[in-house]
Image (cartoon, rainbow, N blue to C red):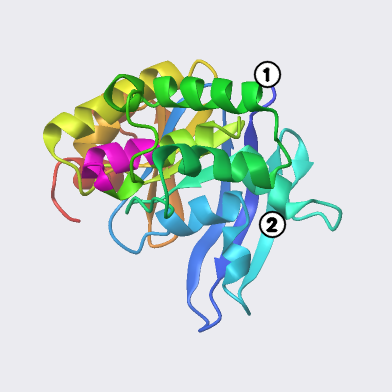
Amino acid sequence: MQPKISIENLSFTYPDGKTALKNITLDIPANEIFMIFGPSRSGKSTLLRLLNRLSDLAEGSQHQGSVRFNGQNIFAPDVNVTDLRRRVSMVFAIPTPLPGSIRDNLTYGLRMAGIRDTHILEERIMRSLKQAALWDEVKDRLESSAFALSGGQKQRLCLARSLALEPDVILLDNPTSGLDPLSTATVEDSLYELKRRYTIIMVPHSTQQAARVANSAAFLLDGELVEVGKAPQFFMRPKDQRTEDYLTGRFG
């Protein structure tokens, strides 16, 4: 099967001259939870941001190589970047609800996309909240402020906001870093259901989380791809000594 995302010889340099990624080649299958992990400053978040061209916001940065999403090069001149970011949606480590109600948060992107039909809006609200395992907790207070939610609920609301736009791929940049263990488990449980419909690419909070949740994983070190493989074999019997050293806590 054609990979959902195919990365070939990808390098990225920030405006200050720092090379964050070095010649990355990687295929990401559809309908998997794909973990990208490694120590701090290994290029994980940079790689995520490249996948929907949020990297464009770093004016003066440079990239080489290609990223193909459903077979199309995302850096081609005719690519609609707004549409790309809808189809390859990012959820950040720190949840950032929009001002307004829970309902406002979920319908903002839909209305920006030109959707006005009340029936469609309500259906998307319910479905996205259910997919993010938040519906039962907020269904009776959709008009309440999104800022009144707990940290874990805010994170799941941001996930639901992305899901409401019906993306193909969800990028999760350390989405449980600030959550308590119960909220983390709730988010992780929702991922197992979501992968049936979406491709999930995630920078995990820890190697333990990566091992728990991943279908496949890639280990980055100093901007280079060290190893990629299928879980659980990847975590139990890594091929590269550097991967084993990191997984066993010898560095990082």
x and y percent of residue 118 in the render?
64, 27
Q: Residue at x 72, y 45 (%)?
A: 83
Q: Is 7 above or below relative to 116?
A: below
> Residue 155 in magenta?
yes
x and y percent of residue 151 in the render?
23, 45
Query: Left or right of 223: which side holds 249?
Result: left
Q: Is 55 above or below relative to 219?
A: below
80 and 12: which is toward the camera: 80
26 and 182: which is toward the camera: 182
Q: Which residues are magenta?
A: 148-157
Most distant residue in the bottom direction? 16
Query: Left or right of 91: which side holds 85?
Result: right
Name the residue tied to disc 2. 65
Circle on res. 22? none
Distance CA(mark 2)–CA(mark 1)? 22 Å
Which is the main secondary structure of the residues drawn in magenta? helix
114 and 91: which is toward the camera: 114
Q: Residue flagged by tag 2: what amino acid is it?
A: Gly
> Residue 174 in magenta?
no
Name the residue tied to disc 1. 1
x and y percent of residue 231 in the render?
35, 23
Q: Quadrant of residue 197?
A: top right
What SS does tag 2 mark?
A: strand
